[in-house]
Image (cartoon, rainbow, N blue to C red):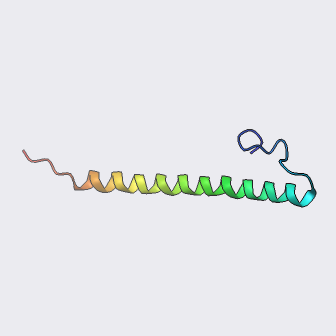
Amino acid sequence: MVRHHGLRRARYWGTKKVGLQAFLTALAVNLKRWVNITLTKIKDKVKLSTASTVTVSA
């Protein structure tokens, strides 16, 4: 989070505001991770279902 989400420096002054910034940043990072994992699972299911229904006629 320090490298990619700006947590090296606080945007606001004060312990409560800095804590809130860190909390919201962590929330956003975890939400992005959850969405990526969910989309990956959905894509895998779609690939499996389409591959299993394909029939080859000779």
Q: Identify the residue at image location x=60%, y=53%.
A: 32
Q: Is residue 26 left or right of residue 9?
A: left
In the image, farthest residue toward the left: 58
**In front here: 10 or 40?**
10
Q: Identify the residue at image location x=72%, y=44%.
A: 5
Q: Is residue 29 left or right of residue 6?
A: left
- How many numbered marks does the figure carry? 0
**Whole-percent x, y for residue 30 in the image:** 66, 56
**Whole-percent x, y for residue 4 in the image:** 71, 40
**Whole-percent x, y for residue 48 in the image:** 34, 53
**In front here: 9 or 57?**
9
Image quadrant containing the C terminus: top left
In the image, farthest residue toward the right: 14
Q: Is residue 41 left or right of residue 48?
A: right
Q: Identify the residue at image location x=91%, y=52%.
A: 13
Position of residue 58 relative to residue 52, above or below, is above
**Whole-percent x, y for residue 10 in the image:** 85, 47
In the image, farthest residue toward the top: 3
Image quadrant containing the N terminus: top right
Q: Is residue 28 left or right of residue 10?
A: left
Q: Identify the residue at image location x=80%, y=55%.
A: 21
